[in-house]
Image: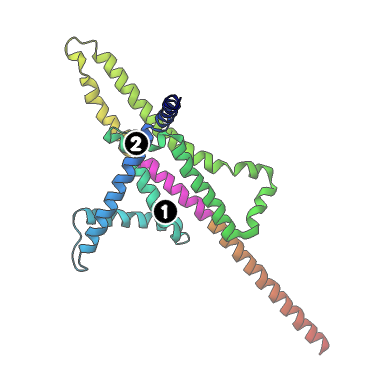
Amino acid sequence: MDNLTRSGLSEIINKNLIKWWQPQLITLIYVTIILVILAIIVYFKVKKIKPDETPKGIVFFAEQYVGLFNKEFDTISEGKIDRVGPYIFTLFTFLAVGNTAGILALEPAVTSYSVSLTLGLITWIGIYVFGIIYQKLHFFKRYSNPIELIGQFSPLISISFRIFGNIIGGSVIMYIIYWSTTEVWSIIPVVGKVNLLGMIIAPWFHMYFDIFDGLIQAYVFALLTGIYWSQEVNEGLEIQEHKKHKQKHKQENQQLMQSDKVKSLV
C-alpha cells in the first residue's frame, strides 16, 4: 500500500513538474544567470579601475550602455521619476536579453503570456501608485466617468499583448520558414536530407526577429512604462500648481477686499 501511494505521489509530482518545465522557464533561468554573472564581472572590473584610467573592454561597453540609457531616460522622465530609473534599466536589460534568446536556440521569455502579463501588471500598478502619490484624492475623480473606468485597463492589455504578439509572431514566422524550406529542399535527392536552403535564408530572418525586433520591443515596453508613470506625475504637478495658483488668487482677492473695507472706513 505504501509503495502504491509513493508511486502515485511521484507520478503526480512528475506530471506537475512537466507542466511547469516550459521552454520559457529555461530561458528565464538562463537570462537570470547571464545577467547576474555580467553584473558581478562589471562590478569587480569597475572597482579595479583607477579614477584617471580610461575604461576598456566590458567596462567601456557598460559605461556607454548606462550612459545611453540615462540620456534616453532623462528625456522621457524629465527628472520627475528618477527613483524608478534602476527598475526601468533592469526591465529593459532583462527584456533585451530575454527577447534575443532565440540566437542561443532558446524560446524568447515573453512568448509565455504569463511573463508579459506579469511585467505589464507592474507597469499598470505603477500608474496607480504614482497617481495616488502625486494626485491624492483627485486621482479617483476619473472614475466618475464610466467610459474612463473601462479605459483604465487599456494600458495593461495594450502593453502586455503588444510585446507578446510581436515576439511570438516572429517565432511563428521562423517556424514557417524552417518548415517550408525543409519541405522544398527535401525534394532534391541525396542533399535534400540537410536543409541547406534554411541555413542560407534563416539567419537573415533571425537577425531581424531575434535581434532587431527583440530589442525594439524591449525598448518600446520600457519607454511606455516610463511615459505612463511620467504622465501621472505631470498631472499631479499640474493639479498642485493649479491649487497654488487658485490659493494665491484667493489671497489676493481677500487682500483687495480688506483694502476696500479700510478705504470705506476712512
Classed neighbour count for the residue bearing mark 2: other residues with Cα under 10 Å, few (<14), some (14–19), many (≥20): some
Say whether residue 169 is left or right of residue 133: left
Residue 163 placement (x, y as % from top left): 43, 38
Identified at 51% across, 53% down, the residue is 229
Q: Is residue 64 above or below residue 251?
A: above
Magenta-drawn stretch contains 216 = yes
Identified by mark 2, the residue type is: Ile
**Which is nearer the eye, 246 or 222?**
222
Dominant SS type (magenta): helix
Residue where numbered disc 2 is placed: 26
Identified by mark 1, the residue type is: Tyr
In the image, the segment drawn in magenta is: 213-231
Decide which of tag 2 and tag 1 comes sooner along the chain: 2
Residue 51 placement (x, y as % from top left): 22, 68
Identified at 31% across, 37% down, the residue is 101
Which residue appears farthest toward the bottom when viewing the image?
Answer: 266
Identified at 16% across, 11% down, the residue is 190
The secondary structure type at the circle numbered 2 is: helix
The secondary structure type at the circle numbered 1 is: helix
Q: Which image quarter: residue 164?
A: top left
Magenta-drawn stretch contains 168 = no
